[in-house]
Image (cartoon, grey):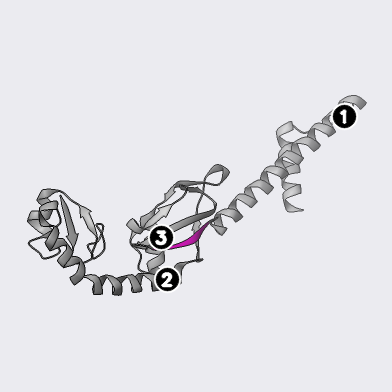
Amino acid sequence: MKVILKETVKSLGNVGEIVNVSAGYARNFLIPNGAAVLADESNTAQVKHFEKLLAKQVAADKAEATKVAGTINGLNIELIKRVGTNGKLFGSVTTHELSLELGKLGHNVERRHLLLENPIRAVGSYDVKAKIFNGVEAAFTVTVKMDPAQEEENKKKAEELAAMKAAQELLAKEQAEAAASGDTSGEMTEEEKLKMEANRILRS
């Protein structure tokens, strides 16, 4: 059922818009509460009347939307996330989250107005469009970065693995040299040598 909105209805549309809704929603909520009027072909005269009546409100709301668009156009929102292998996120960044982030910056933009050109599922930069009102759009960027604490943890683990690998390679070299010279006296076990060399490298 088509109705013309007499006021902006969250998750549905802006004032003056003609939208399709279920008959029950229109008759039991929107129309009785004065939020909309019927906009089918049998009600053309009333639709035109309300379009003229709401023109001033539409213009005011559009002006406000244009102002909001100007504040977020070209904006860059930085999100810090813990990530898995290859920089993949545990889940994805949603339009709901972006709406909340914009709200923290003082920009009231509903999630239904946000359009992701590509799903945000990994670290990187992403373009987002905001269709705030009829004919009013803006574009901004979302940059997802790894949590610095996690980055430091990963760096430490990589250094430890590199040290262990170096210790293993050095031990193998020493064993090969000992075998070639036939000197096996006083030799520690392989495990003891590995631990000793790893500790030496980590302390250096």
- Left of 100 or right of it: where is 86? right
Disc 2, disc 3: CB below 8 Å? Answer: no
Q: Which marked residue is nearer to the observer: mark 3 or mark 1?
A: 3
Farthest residue, direction right: 181
Circle nearer the N terminus (2, 3): 2
Q: Is residue 117 above or below residue 139?
A: above
Residue 174: percent from the left, percent from the top?
A: 84, 34
Residue type at numbered disc 3? Ala
Numbered mark located on residue 105 in the image:
2
Numbered mark located on residue 178 in the image:
1
Residue type at numbered disc 1? Ala
Q: CA distance from mark 2 to mark 1?
A: 67 Å
Q: Nearer the viewer, residue 81 or 115?
A: 115
Instruction: Please check the rendered image and state whether residue 138 is part of the magenta-colored stretch, yes or no.
Output: yes
Residue type at numbered disc 2? Leu
Q: Residue at x 22, y 54 (%)?
A: 19
- What kind of element bears circle 3? strand
Q: Nearer the viewer, residue 143 or 134?
A: 134
Q: Nearer the viewer, residue 73 or 89?
A: 73
Q: Residue at x 72, y 44 (%)?
A: 163
Residue 120: percent from the left, percent from the top?
A: 47, 49
* Badge 2: residue crowd in 10 Å (few <14, some 14–19, many ≥20): few
Disc 3, disc 1: CB below 8 Å? Answer: no
**Residue range highlighted in magenta:** 136-143
- What kind of element bears circle 1? helix
* Badge 3: residue crowd in 10 Å (few <14, some 14–19, many ≥20): many
- Left of 165 or right of it: where is 101? left
Q: Which marked residue is nearer to the observer: mark 2 or mark 1?
A: 2
Circle nearer the N terminus (3, 1): 3
Q: CA distance from mark 2 to mark 3?
A: 15 Å
Q: Nearer the viewer, residue 200 or 117?
A: 117
Identify the residue under disc 3.
130
